[in-house]
Image: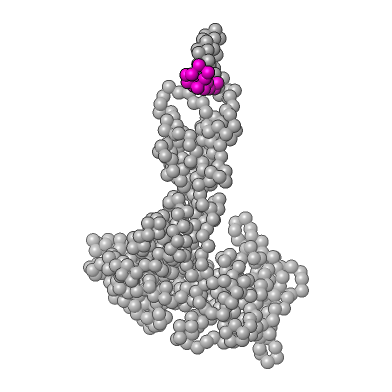
Amino acid sequence: MDTMGFWAPEIDKGEIMKIIKSLFAPIKTWGNLLKVPITIKKSDIFDSPREAADNYRGFHINDWEKCLGCGTCGEICPTKAIEMYSIKELVISDGHKPERPAIDYGRCSFCALCVDICTSDSLKMSKEYIHISTNANTMKFIPKENGIHNIPFEIGYSRDEISDLLDLNRNEIDEIPHEGRINSFMELIKGFSKEMAISEAARCVECGICTETCPAHMNIPEYIKCILTDDLTSGLEYLYETNPLSNACGRVCTHKCEDACVIGNRGEAISIRWLKRYIVDNSSDEDYKSIAMHNVSKIINGSVAIVGAGPGGLSAGYYLRTLGYSVDIYDAHALPGGVIRYGVPPYRFPDDALEQDLKVIKQMGINFIMNTKIGEDIKLSDLEETYDAIYLSTGHWVPKKLPIENLEHKNVQYSNEFLEQSRNYLRGKGLMPEIDKQVIVIGGGDVSFDVARTLLRFQQEKYGETEVHFIARKNEENLAASRVEVIEGKEEGLIMHLERSPSRILIDELDEITGVESKVCQTIILDNGCAKTEYKNIKPEIIKGTRIYLSVGSTTEIEYFNSVQKKSLPINRKNILSVEENQQIKNYPHIFAGGDLTGGKDVITAVANGHEAAKSIDAYLIQQSLN
């Protein structure tokens, strides 16, 4: 109230200034009528481009050398402005698709989500913002490193730590700590919990590059998505559609898919192998039974003999049964599984996991004929007379040797023999191998580490202490073994002697082994990828040990072919059997081969070979029936 007795509102000075400005604003604008307009020619724009403000989101640039062609940018685009195009000039390779993103600037909202999620850091946005055309169809571009007009512009926007949309760090798998690990043969990896599996699965961008790289072309993004939706029944179906040994590959696969994972380009690859294992470990017996019953077919098409009950033979048998063939699998061992049964230590792959895969395969009606060696117990020619087609997948069971003195000593044992004896003992079907207090393993690959780490456990059980010496020609960086084997072997107490080449086995006057003489050497990796060993003029090192285990590779056994057949077989100097693209043996159209026999190097390749062979055998027999 004022002194006159009536009410007056309080005056807001800010509002008064707004009113004054609004009154005079038109006058200021009218002043522009007196200015001379400026016209910028199209040529001037591109000859002398005007720089935009800092952090301006202009047209995209894409470094084709970095780009993986994964298509993640297109998947996230909210306006569907990005489409992937195949580029003929690009070379297909593991981890890369021959595709590049095309961007429709009639749709693009310049939100930069494509940049924030780019898996290779190839995609950015420049300060280039001008494009002149009367044709609306010229608004779509496949940008390169110099933008859309091939004119270099400064970077206007790129991803940073705050805007990064990818989770680059793996979820740690639950495993037994290395302290005290050698006290048992218990499986080292415990697996993901449900929460950790879902968190790891959420990192996947579903690009499918992993599927292209996997030898078996497994449905990887599909089964990972099933983990996210907690639909393990469908996940198991996706697994067994392309891999009937998913329990095995969930543990011992060489996981080429992870090497190709686009997330691994900037961070840590998704744990694809462990996600596969999560599905198989947490699926019910009913789910497994359903897989077998759903895939089995009536026997209507003929009969096939498979020689070798390893991964390749099991895979071929599984898919041949889905196609309606009667399948008999022959193997010289007492139990099916091949190398994953007899060559992989139980701390990496226990029998229970293999039995789950075998249960599915057996339920499909495949007949196993064990303890039967082709060429001795039954001739290959007998199989040719009995069956419509044959698939050979007999693996690598013949050990390679080194040209060193005293190799034939009774206390020199080869990896295949030792690992098979060890597995039989641990499953209660044989005697414990002879274990000395001081032993030497010669090798460098994964199998040699399997031998050495198995010896550590036996020594710990028998003596309460360990002394396993490991000799390899290469340095740690270039060892053929996987990195995890090297790390875990060292954690468990292996004594490493690297860049050493054994020259002779030392024997005393009582004809007992006392050690190995080894030359100091250096292995050089040549440009073609081959290794060359150079010896140094240094006094040889003496490594003490009373028993030697040799693990320098193995080769194929093809004694089941008769002398006439061997002369016409396409076998190279490494004793690898060459086959046609459909895995047919030349000159023997009814015989197919795969796995280690034809140069395969791992379980997943053998599985893929078995799948392809089944399809080829089916095509061959259908053609035969039409002739």
Q: Residue at x 66, y 61 (%)?
A: 524
Q: Name the image quarter holding residue 354.
A: bottom left
Residue 491, above or below 200: below
Give the dominant element type of the magenta stretch: helix, strand or loop: loop
Residue 172, above or below 85: below
Residue 130 placement, left or right of 278: right
Residue 47, above or below 38: below
Q: Residue at x 72, y 78 (%)?
A: 542
Residue 16 placement, left or right of 332: right
Seen from the viewer's position, the closer of residues 392 and 368 is 368
Q: How is the image coloured?
A: one colour
Residue 317, above or below 61: below
Q: Position of residue 61 (x, y in %)?
A: 53, 36
The residue stretch that appears in magenta:
1-14
Q: Name the image quarter holding residue 160.
A: top right
Q: Residue at x 64, y 65 (%)?
A: 476
Outermost residue toward the top in this view:
34
**Is residue 7 highlighted in magenta?**
yes
Seen from the viewer's position, the closer of residues 209 and 128 is 128
**Is residue 604 highlighted in magenta?**
no
Q: Position of residue 602 (x, y in %)?
A: 48, 66
Q: Residue at x 37, y 81 (%)?
A: 370
Seen from the viewer's position, the closer of residues 14 and 261 is 14
Q: Quadrant of the C terminus?
A: bottom left
Residue 123 placement, left or right of 290: right
Q: Position of residue 432 (x, y in %)?
A: 52, 87
Q: Name the image quarter holding residue 294.
A: bottom left
- Can residue 151 be seen here? no
- Can residue 123 be seen here? yes
Q: Position of residue 289 (x, y in %)?
A: 30, 70
